[in-house]
Amino acid sequence: MKSGKRAQRGSRPQAATRSDRRTPPSKKSAPSKAWTGRFTETTHALVERFTCSLPFDRRLFEYDILGSLAHCQALEKAGILTRAERRSLMRGLERVRDELRENRFPFADSDEDIHMAVERRLTEIVGPVGGKLHTGRSRNDQVTLDLRLYLREHLQVLQARLQDLQRAFLGQARQHLDVIIPGYTHLQRAQPVSLAHHFLAYVEMLERDIARVRDDFKRVNVMPLGSGALAGNNYPIDRAFTAKLLGFPALTRNSLDGVSDRDYVAETLGVLAIIMMHLSRLSEELVLWASHEFSFVELPDGFCTGSSMLPQKKNPDVPELIRGKTGRVYGHVLSIMTTLKGLPLSYNRDLQEDKEPLFDAMETVIECLTVYAELIRRLRIRRDVLSGTLGSGFLLATELADYLVNKGVPFREAHGIVGQLVRHCLEHRREWQDLSLADLKAASPHFSKDALLFLTLEGAVDRKAQTGGTSRKQVTRQMNAWEARLAKKPKA
Ligand code: ARG
């Protein structure tokens, strides 16, 4: 994925919550909004607070300033700014950026959003020329530019984290090719599979997630600036030049759509929800597998907590929390879809409600992926328990039916014969390995000595030898292919 220069340094964005709203701006100041010319009274304090988006959109400051720096250059190219004015504005913007980065930006009560705050402060620093920055631009095209820049960066982080989790699974697969586990359908024992095969199933899911992220990225990576408030703008601003400066390969083609499109937010949230759905399935499995009843795995101590009352407890909090956070991310999908469904063209203030769900979902998913990669790397497989548990549950019943098929018995008939053998075993509390050749022969004359050889777990696994099957040969092929693929750098 290609994007312009990295805009944000180091600092991990914090999650946006409603309670952020209660954080008061750091400094009081008399509102001096040049653009409020048509009003006869100042904004009511309640409304100022109610409409303010700063508690959550301040995290867009890097992108906002990046966009403004490019806009300054486009304004100079269009002959709207002199070189000296452009330089003064750019230097001023860099100073504002430093103040924001270093947490010493003097926010004012009158700052409605990050765009107003930056422009107000810029004008304080550079003087009246600050008032020229917003020429040919509206906050409507500015805010969607900022969001697209935010997303370009975060979608790349997301892709890297998805790949890291794939690597963690691949590492586990490599170490456990020879470990056989019961495979389940309906959570009932079905057929033996290689544990490596099981881990690679998650690598496949994550690969589809990555493909969705990359596809979404294409629609995010379009430059909306120049759409103005809704109709375009009156200046000879070279939009392609701005796009090039910011690393966008395409321009929005319709200004009404340019300012009001949030499909890319909805789409991103959908992509994030599917990732969480996968992580939640993994969580469910880990919670089960770590339970005393299964005991297939042991979660790393550093990723569990104890109970304040029950001394023996080691709780799988991380998988549980990730499963729980899935509901939260799903909620954000419904939130954006509902916000958008009633909006006439073009910009409507409702659109300000796109940010909190998006930021919260993005940051939640990135965090979940990061934690899971570390947990999976440290997951301990209980080989002892697994090997002890495979004898029960008739995991090899289908093998025996397939044996009969090889001897010319139609599959349906073979299925019936083996079913009766299972019933016999259940009635006499016997397992497969307790059966003698005579028992088998009593069920069908087609059984002969080699039938007992057919009844091994390894044989059952390795006979699934087509593409996609669990044979060790196939799984090794898949692991090699993944290894080669994951060694490569992510492509644009
Ligand atoms: N804070 C606004 C948002 O997030 C920015 C755009 C406001 N535009 C306007 N005309 N009030 O959507």
Image (spheres, rainbow, N blue to C red):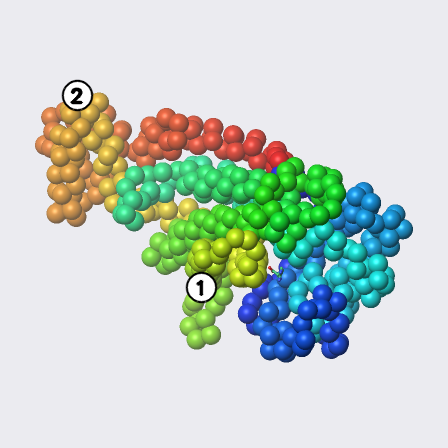
Residue at 52% x, 33% y is 482
Q: Residue 306 — which label? A: none
Residue 156 higher or lower than 55, as above or below = above
Residue at 57% x, 39% y is 218
Residue 357 lies, in percent from the top left, at 52, 59
Residue 395 lies, in percent from the top left, at 27, 40
User: In this view of the protein, which residue sits in the foreground, 85 or 24?
Assistant: 85
Q: Secondary structure at mark 1?
A: loop
The residue positioned farthest toward the right in the image shown: 84
Judged left or right of residue 23, residue 322 is left
Q: Secondary structure at mark 2?
A: loop
The quadrant the N terminus occupies is top right
Count up the numbered dots.
2
Q: Quadrant of ligand 1?
A: bottom right
Q: Residue 315 — which label? A: 1
Can residue 136 be spotted in the picture?
Answer: yes
Q: Identify the residue under disc 2.
A: 408
Residue 108 lies, in percent from the top left, at 73, 72
Residue 123 lies in quadrant = bottom right
**What residue type is disc 1 on?**
Asn
Residue 398 lies in quadrant = top left
**What residue type is disc 2 on?**
Gly
